[in-house]
Image: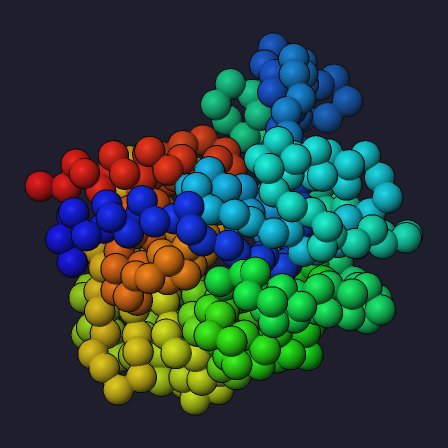
Amino acid sequence: MTVQDKIAAIKRFDRGRIAVLGDLMLDVYLWGNVTRISPEAPVPVVNVEKRTFCLGGAANVMRNISTLGGKALAFGAVGRDVSGKEIISGLDEFGISHDGIVAADGRRTTEKCRVVAGAQQLLRADFEDAVPLDDALREIMVCKIEKLIASGEVDAVIFDDYAKGVLDAWMLQRIIAAARESGVITMLDPKPKAGGVSAVKGLTVLKPNRSEAFALSGVHDDNFSGDPAENKALLLASERIFEIWEPEYLLISLAAQGMALFQRGKLLKRIPTRAREVFDVSGAGDTVAASCTLALATGSDAVTAAEIANFAAGVVVGKIGTAPILHDELLTAVQQVK
């Protein structure tokens, strides 16, 4: 597609209604300066000057959908704590519906706290209870999404798995079945490790990064850095994933190599990276999930959707911290192509 076609596709984003189900997180930043070394241990002492927070994990996918002009509907779990309240307030700030969020007794909201001195991150402390969520709470969320699909109120569902215990395969399989009947797009950003969702079939898009793709397939990564179309290990991994998961499309993020889009029975489509400078890759996968799904949900074909997502990723990796992409930023990035 031409640049003008991509611009037209991005301008349709305001038509997209996307339900996002997954692991909600709060990204907290403690900003300060280091002036001395602690007398208690050989570590720097940070004089904290301010605390900020932003939406992370699945909540960052929701935020990206909103800043790109789409409508996001939030589904996930928080604890009955301050961090949970801050996630809700963050969603409110972006006009994101959170009627689908459940509060879990005895469960901490996942919080990732980063200590930053100047421009250098010194430490990250995680607060979380990465245990399976009660099935009764899961059922509440699944039923709400099924009703939205049946009533035609959503165009796509994104499953964002960080292996924190919210998702289980039976949830995805039920929602996928309802979505396929109604022509609703489904995407999974997987985490192939303990606590992650096991294989489900029938997704529209499965979107792992390179290491996740090899883990999902069980194929050894040979760290080939040339043309992905000549990477035999990557091609074998994609074949295995199609056999196990049976998605319509497989979109693999390859960092500096861009992306590889696979469709059963067709040649790999390589999409070169659009990043100019890389400062921080935090949240880039969330941006890809949001932008690609919005494009598909508003009428773009898979190649165009992947190319738009690649532009979006190229913008956010040039920012520091977990930051979303704005609709106008994406338009500008596409318009600057020569």
Q: Nearer the viewer, residue 252 or 37?
A: 252
Q: How is the image coloured?
A: rainbow
In the shown orientation, is residue 245 left or right of residue 178? left
For the point 73% across and 69% down, the residue is 143
The answer to whether residue 27 is seen in the rendering is: no
Q: Residue furthest right?
A: 106
In the shown orientation, is residue 242 left or right of residue 33? left
Residue 91, located in which quarter of the rendered image?
A: top right
Residue 30, located in which quarter of the rendered image?
A: top right
In the shown orientation, is residue 40 left or right of residue 283? right
- Asked if residue 138 is positioned above or below residue 108 in the image, the reply reads below
Image location (x, y in percent) of residue 287: 44, 48
- Asked if residue 178 is positioned above or below residue 140 in the image, the reply reads below
Q: Nearer the viewer, residue 22 or 119?
A: 22
For the point 71% across and 64% down, the residue is 144
- In the picture, the quarter occupied by the C terminus is top left
For the point 71% across and 39% down, the residue is 88
Q: Nearer the viewer, residue 45 or 139?
A: 139
Q: Residue furthest left?
A: 338
For the point 41% across and 61% down, the residue is 297
Image location (x, y in percent) of residue 233: 31, 78
Q: Residue furthest top?
A: 35
- In the picture, the quarter occupied by the N terminus is bottom left
The answer to whether residue 8 is seen in the rendering is: yes
Image location (x, y in percent) of residue 301: 28, 66
- Asked if residue 61 is positioned above or below residue 47 in the image, the reply reads below
Image location (x, y in percent) of residue 154: 54, 61
